[in-house]
Amino acid sequence: MNEQAPSVEQRFAESTPAALGTWARHDTTWMLGLFGTAIGAGTLFLPINAGLGGFWPLLILAVLAFPMTYFAHRGLTRFVLSGRDGSDITEVVKEHFGITAGASITVLYFFAIFPILLIYSVALTNTVSSFMEHQLHLQPPPRAILSFVLILGLLAIVRCGEQATVKVMSLLVYPFIVALALLGLYLVPHWTGGILDSATEVPPASAFLHTLWLAIPVMVFSFNHSPIISAFAVDQKRRYGEHADERSGQILRRAHLLMVVMVLFFVFSCVLTLSSAQLAEAKAQNLSILSYLANHFSNPTIAFAAPLIAFVAIAKSFLGHYIGASEGLKGIIAKTGARPGAKALDRVVAALMLVVCWIVATLNPSILGMIESLGGPILAVLLFLMPMYAIRRVPSMRKYSGAASNVFVVVVGLVALTSVVYGLVS
């Protein structure tokens, strides 16, 4: 693979922060990169997972979606911005909380993100193999060869550098947005009321709150893009200096508005087309909403498009999660006392990622889903609770204290954390 272009941290000292100015192309690139990391193949299951709780919980989740996403990710961005120039999240944690806590959180950060990358490696291989067999009527190559080629292709993009990776992700977002919009519009003539059949039945308060409690993590993690936030914050600080908080807030707002509007339009279009019983049937069959709709309408176009849309969704999310996972792995290597050069470290990390992702994608171990679930509580703590704790403890972040949004983030974080833990032990 080629020499990797300089990382954001390496370029930090080579640039002079610009004035805030007007919205620029690279701001749009980051906005779409954030969207690309968050909105992956899980979006194709969201109408089923979120809709099964009934109309009223879904409506409340829809109202909470933007503030839950925006305030949490803004807090994590501010946390990274509060560190020294060029410091990523692993270095900022050590700077604020000490060497021991920094090392522990760096390890947890990596193991919260890396299993998701492995899941995407498996899903990518499954999607392409199934597409070749069922839509193209071709015999797919052996799984080991197919997975190696696919993962190597994505890592070749990563080796072009962080900025190139984000640009590729932003380009992949366009067809995905168009596909979601067209699918949502295609369903409009077929709206039958769907989930509205449960709108007249208001459950008891205890049952309603229990349903909402279990459903909040579904929405929280559907819009999660914390793996790329560290690189995003470092780049904003490099570009805008003291204006980084303001510009990053603008980018986050637009990215989250785009996410919420597009995804919720798609979700509501699906749940207004299918009844609660049909959503339950799709869940029981473990089908994505596109696969179920293709069968429901006997539509070969949707059946053909479904794996292509899934491929784009998985590929862009893989790239975004790779940035976070590689950052965590570099932090772990640094904690061992090893001091390889930047290029050597990039090559070692890329090689390790390639080998592990390839082996897992080839073997597809059944334990992978359970490992991914264990990362849920860690992500909830890192995304929601750690930045709010830092606001109270870190002098450079105390200027953000006293906001009502901080209380909101803590409450949502605790709800998500307890719900995920409950799901693991029950």
Image (cartoon, helix red, strand yellow):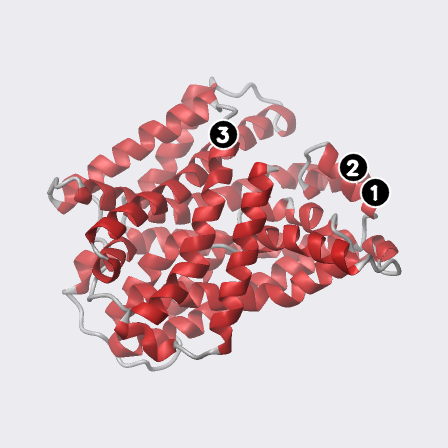
Q: Residues within 10 Å of mark 2 (few under 14, many from 20)?
A: some
Q: Residues within 10 Å of mark 1 (few under 14, many from 20)?
A: few
Which comes before the other along the chain, label 2 or label 3? Answer: 3
Which comes before the other along the chain, label 3 or label 1? Answer: 3
Q: Disc 1 marks which amino acid?
A: Ala
Mark 3 secondary-structure assignment: helix
Label 2 vs label 3: CA separation? 26 Å
Name the residue located 72 percent from the left edge and 38 percent from the top edge: 283
Name the residue located 47 percent from the left edge and 64 percent from the top edge: 72
The numbered mark at residue 277 is 1
Residue 160: horizontal and vertical position, in percent?
28, 47
Question: Quick one: 200 or 314, which is closer to the camera?
Answer: 200
**Side (left or right) of 322 relative to 316:** left
Q: Nearer the viewer, mark 2 or mark 3?
A: 2
Q: Nearer the viewer, mark 3 or mark 1?
A: 1
Residue 328: horizontal and vertical position, in percent?
30, 46
Mark 1 secondary-structure assignment: helix
Task: Please say if 103 is above or below 142.
Answer: below
**Side (left or right) of 348 relative to 192:** left
Label 2 vs label 1: CA separation? 6 Å
The numbered mark at residue 281 is 2
**In the rendered structure, are the residues bearing label 2 and label 3 in contact, judged by CB atoms less than 8 Å apart?**
no
